[in-house]
Image (cartoon, grey):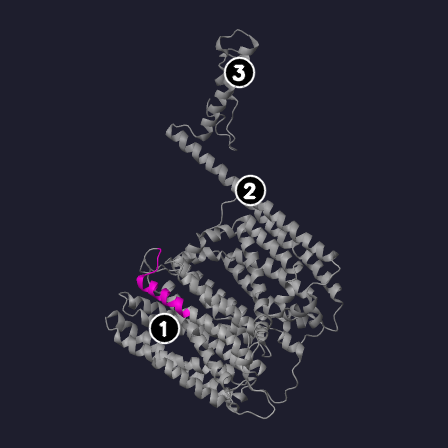
Amino acid sequence: MAAAGVTVIVLVAALRFGGGVDGAVLPGIPSPGVVTEWTLPVLTLVANLLGVLTVGFTVTAAFLLPGDGASVAARGWVLLRRTTWLALLWAVTSGALIVYTVSDVLAVPAGQLSRHAIVSFAFSISQGQALLLQTGLALAVAVLSRGGVSRGLAAVTAVLAMVTVLPPAFTGHAAGAGNHQIAVTSLALHVLAASLWVGGLAGLLLVRRHRRFADTAARYSRLALGCFVATAVSGGANAVVRLGGWGEVWGSRYGVLVLLKVFGLAVVGVIGLAHRRRTLPALRSGAPRAFLRLAAGELVVLGAAVGLAVALSRTPTPVPEGSVEPDPLVELLGFAPPGPPTAVRMLGDPLPDLFFLTVVVLGIAAYLAGVRRMRRAGHDWPISRTASWIAGMLTLAAITGLGVARYAYVLFSAHMVQHMVLSMVVPILLVGGAPVTLALRTLRRPADPQVRGAREWLLVVLHSRLFRLLSHPLVALGSYVVSLYGLYLGDLLGTLMRYHLGHLAMLVHFVLAGYLLFWVLIGVDPGRRRVHPALLTVVHFLAMVAHAFFGFVLLQSTSVIAPDWYLAVHPAWASSLLADQHLGAGLAWAFGELPAVVIMLILVRQWIRSDEREQARVDRAADRAEAGGDEDDLARYNAFLAVAAASSAGGASLASGAGLAGGALSAGGVPVAESASAVVENPAPDGRRESHEK
C-alpha cells in the first residue's frame, strides 16, 4: 500500500511539474475536459502496474519457484490464480484506455464520443491497435492462468504476459522520434526489463514464507541484476533520442524528470547490491525479516520510478533549437532518405537497431563463455564452430545495422538482398556453430532437482511435441516456402514495412525460418529427427526449385509489390518501381546458387559417411558373431535365402516330373540348400569371408 501511495503522489507531482496535465482552458481551443486529462494518466498507471504484477506473478510461478514434478508448486498455483484476476482487470483497463485516448486525441469529453469514433480509432490508428491488442492478449493470459498446473503451461503464460506489456511501447513519443529504430526498440526493452524487475520483486514478497525461499531469492537476484543493466542501457538510449541533445537534460522539465528517474535507478541499484552482499546470506542463515525491510524499500523506490515513467509519457519532449517543420517521409521512415547508393553509403552509413545489436552482443558473449567453460573442464571445442557462429552473428549485425538497412526501406532490390542474407547466409553460419550442443554441455544443472534451469527448459523444448512437429523436414520446408511466397504475393509486405514492430518481426522470421530449415538439413545438434541424408537431399532440392521458381515469378510479374509503401518512399534518383523489382527478383534468383551448392555438398558428404558408418556397423556385428561362435544377421539372411532356394527348386522338380526323391539333389548331386548358400557372398569390402554358410 505504501508503494502504491508513493507511486500516485509521484505521478501527480510529475504531471504538474512537467506539464503533462494543464487545467487551463483557452477560448476557442477544444479540450477533452479535466476528467479525461486526469483519468488518462491514472488509467495508464493502473494498466502498467497490473501488467507488471501479472508478469511478476507468472514468472515467479513458472521459473523462480521450485516445482512439484511436472506441476508448479502450491504457492505457484496460488500466484497463477491471482494472476487471473489481475489479467482480467488489466484487459478492462486497457479497453478503457482506448476510450479516453480517443477523447484526448479528438479533444472531446469521453461521454460525448460516438461509437464509430472509438471503433475506428481501435482498428485503424496504431495507438488504438496497440491497446486493442493488449486487451486481447491480457484476456488470453487470464484464460491460460486457469488452464491447469503444468509447468510448461505456466511458462507459456509467463512468456505471453511479457509479450502483452509491449504493444503500447511501440506508439507515443518513441514511435514519433527521429530514429525510431533505436527509440522504439529501446523503449520496448526498457519496459520489459522493468516489468520483470518490479514484478518479480512483488511476486517474491508473496512467497517469502516458502521453505526454499533463500534459493528462490538468489535466482531472482541474478534476474534482477540483468534487468538493472538492461533498464539502465535501454533507458539511457531512449532518453538520448527523446531529448535531442545533452543541453536539454538541464534545460527542460522533461530532462529534469529523466534525471530524477536516473537517481531512483541508482538508489535501487545500491539496494540491490546490499541484497546480494547482506540479505541473501542472512536468508540462508534463517533471518527473513532483513529481506522484507530492504525489499519493501526497494519496491517503494521502484513504484516511484513507475510513476515518473507514466508522467514522462505525458510530458512534451524537448524540441531542439533550429528545428524545421516535420518531414512526413522522415516520420514514416524514422530517418532522412538516403542518397544514390554507393559502396561507402551501403557500408559506412549505419542505421543500428538496438534489438539486433542486443542479440548479437549477447549471442557472441554467451557462446564465448560456453567455449571458455568447455576448455576449463578439459574438453575441446572445434574452432571452426566458434568461427562459424561469430561470423553469423557479425553478418546479422552488418545486414541489419549498416547502410544497406537504410536502402532496404526504400528499394525493393536492397530489401531482397537483406532477405536473402538473413534467410540463407546467416542461418547456415549459425547452424554451423552447433549452439544447442554447446549449451547442453556447458549450462549448469540446478542444485535442486525440482528447479528447472536454462538447460532443463531447453530439453523440454527439444522434446516437446510442437518442436517435433516444426522440425519435421516437410514442415520446415513448408514454413520456409510458404512465408517466401505469402509475404510477396499475398500483399503482406507493405503492411509489415509500415510498422516498426511488423518490420522487426519480418526480419526475425527470415532468420528463424532459414535456421529451422538448415538445422533440419545439416545441423549436428541433438533433437533432430533421424532422417536419411538421401531424403534430406530431396527436401533441399525441393527448396532450391521453390526458390528458383519464386525468382522466375517475380521476374515475369508486371504488377508492383506493396505499391502503397514503395510509392510513398521511392527516391527520386531511383529507377522505376517495376525495374527495381525485377532487379530484386534477379538477385533473389541468383543469390541462392552458392549457398544451395554448399548445402548439397554437405548433404552428399553426410550421405557417404552414413553409408560408411552402416557398413562399419555390419562388419563389427559380423566380427562379434564370429568370435562368439554365433550367427550374425548376414548369416541368418543367407540361411533364409538358402531355404527359399531349396523350396523353389523342390517345387520345380516335382512339377517337371524328373523323378528325383523330394527334389533334394541338384544335377551335380549336391544338396540345393548347400549350393544356394555357397553363392551368397559376404558384401564386406575387405573380403574376409566369402560366405557365412560355407
Q: In the rendered structure, which disc, 1 or 2, sits on the residue that comes first in sequence?
A: 1
Give SS at disc 3: helix
- The one nearer the camera, 447 or 204, is 204
- The one nearer the camera, 51 or 352, is 51
**Which residue lies most toward the top here?**
659
Magenta span: helix, strand or loop, mainly? helix
The answer to whether residue 300 is left or right of residue 503 is: left
Q: Which mark is residue 201?
A: 1
Q: Is residue 177 visible?
A: yes
Foreground disc of the pair 3, 2: 3
Residue at screen point 53% across, 51% down: 520
User: Which amino acid does the dot numbered 1 rest on?
Assistant: Leu
Give SS at disc 1: helix
Residue matched to label 3? 649
Dot 3: few (<14), some (14–19), or many (≥20) neighbours within 10 Å?
some
How far is mark 1 from mark 3, CA to CA? 84 Å
Residue matched to label 2? 608
How far is mark 3 from mark 2, CA to CA? 39 Å
User: Which amino acid does the dot numbered 3 rest on?
Assistant: Ala
Q: Is residue 640 above or below residue 386?
A: above
User: Which amino acid does the dot numbered 2 rest on?
Assistant: Ile
Pointers 1 and 2 in contact (C-beta within 8 Å) = no
Pointers 1 and 3 in contact (C-beta within 8 Å) = no
- The one nearer the camera, 476 or 81, is 81
- The one nearer the camera, 464 or 356, is 464
Residue range in magenta is: 70-86
Q: In the rendered structure, which disc, 3 or 2, sits on the residue that comes first in sequence?
A: 2
Q: Is residue 648 above or below residue 63?
A: above
Q: Which mark is residue 652?
A: none
Of the 4 image quadrants, the one containing the N terminus is bottom left
Q: Is residue 241 visible?
A: no
> Which image quadrant for residue 578?
bottom right
